[in-house]
Every structure is written in C-alpha cells, then in structure tokens.
Amino acid sequence: MTNLTSGIYAFQAKDGEYWSVIEYSTGGSLYVVAGKQAIDDWCRFTVVPNGDSSFSLKDKNGNYLSIIQESSDGPLYLESSQKTVIDNWCIFYVYDGDLPNSINFQVIGNDTTYYLTIINMDGRNYVEARNDSDPAWRNFFPTQIIPE
C-alpha cells in the first residue's frame, strides 16, 4: 500500500485535469471535480493522517472532504462538506494505481469498499465513490505542493 505523508497535495486525473472544489449554483453543493488545467487554491488539499494507514482531506477553508449521497438512489459524490468531525465517509485509504506514479483511493461505507473515480455527467468530471466504473479512471497522480 502506498502512503501519503501529511502536507498539501493536488490530485490529477488521467486526462490531466486537477481536482477542484466547484460550486455550480449559489448555495449549492461544493463538488470535487477534475476540471482545472492548472493548480489554483481550490486544487490544494491538505492530507491529514488519522493515525492508522488512513487519512482525511481538507480543502482550503479547512472543511473535510466527504462522500455525500444527496438522494437515496443518487451518486456518492466527493464534496467539500461542512463537517468538522471526521466520520467514516471522510476516511480514505490509498493504494498503488495501475499506471506509473498513480494512486487509487478507497473509502469504506455501508459495509462496502468503494473506489474514488471520475464519472462524466453533463460535461463535468465528478469525483465519485463507485465500484462499477472503468478502472482506468480510478488512477490519480498526486503532486505534493511545497509552501513558498
């Protein structure tokens, strides 16, 4: 298993786009999508080790990233939550990916292990927790950002 050390990272999908927190409507959900060509403040995520082999991620405002299902039959989106306490949906594990220098993320919820993956919907590359996706889109490339 690969390990991420504490620090600030950007994560890139296999198509070269970076994860970013994006709000598509005022007051709406803060989705994590692979949609930026260059790293900006919303593409920087703090890795917080949880003391075992897991970790959590925070956005630039200090909010934990969490898997959130907005409706009973809806997708399991990765979102910037308002959570200040870590729950199971904020805990991630990382493993070596299938592509060189890539990693796969896993999250365990409802007694099921899910992979973070890119799902294109409405022209947007959402990061979701799924088991039935193309394994190639589970590969992410981490870049550790050194503070200036």
Image: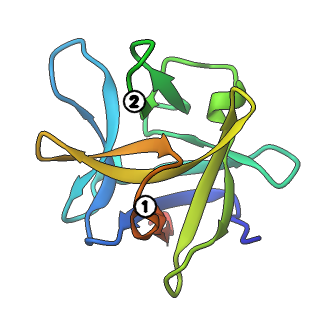
Q: Is residue 44 visible?
A: no
Q: Is residue 110 above or below residue 97?
A: above
Residue at position x 80%, y 43% in the image: 50
Left/right placement of residue 77 relative to residue 21 reads: right
In the image, 30 versus 84, the foreground residue is: 30
- Residue 67 pos. (x, y %): 52, 31
How many circles with numbers are drawn on the protein? 2
Disc 2 residue crowd, few under 14, some 14–19, many 20+, Cα 10 Å: some
- Residue 35 pos. (x, y %): 22, 53
* Disc 2 element: loop
State if disc 1 and disc 2 touch (CB < 8 Å): no
- Point out the frontmost of discs 2 and 1: 2
Q: Is residue 46 above or below residue 38?
A: above
The three-letter amino acid code for the residue at tag 1 is: Ala
Mark earlier in primary sequence (2, 1): 1
Q: CA distance from mark 2 to mark 1?
A: 23 Å
In the image, 57 versus 90, the foreground residue is: 90
Residue at position x 42%, y 42% in the image: 128
The residue labelled by disc 1 is: 10
* Disc 1 element: strand
Left/right placement of residue 29 relative to residue 141 reads: left
The residue labelled by disc 2 is: 75
Quarter of the image holding residue 103? bottom right
The three-letter amino acid code for the residue at tag 2 is: Pro
Left/right placement of residue 22 relative to residue 133 reads: left
- Residue 45 pos. (x, y %): 48, 49
Report the quarter where the N terminus lies: bottom right
Residue at position x 68%, y 67% in the image: 95
Disc 1 residue crowd, few under 14, some 14–19, many 20+, Cα 10 Å: many
Q: Which mark is residue 129?
A: none
Q: Is residue 67 visible?
A: yes
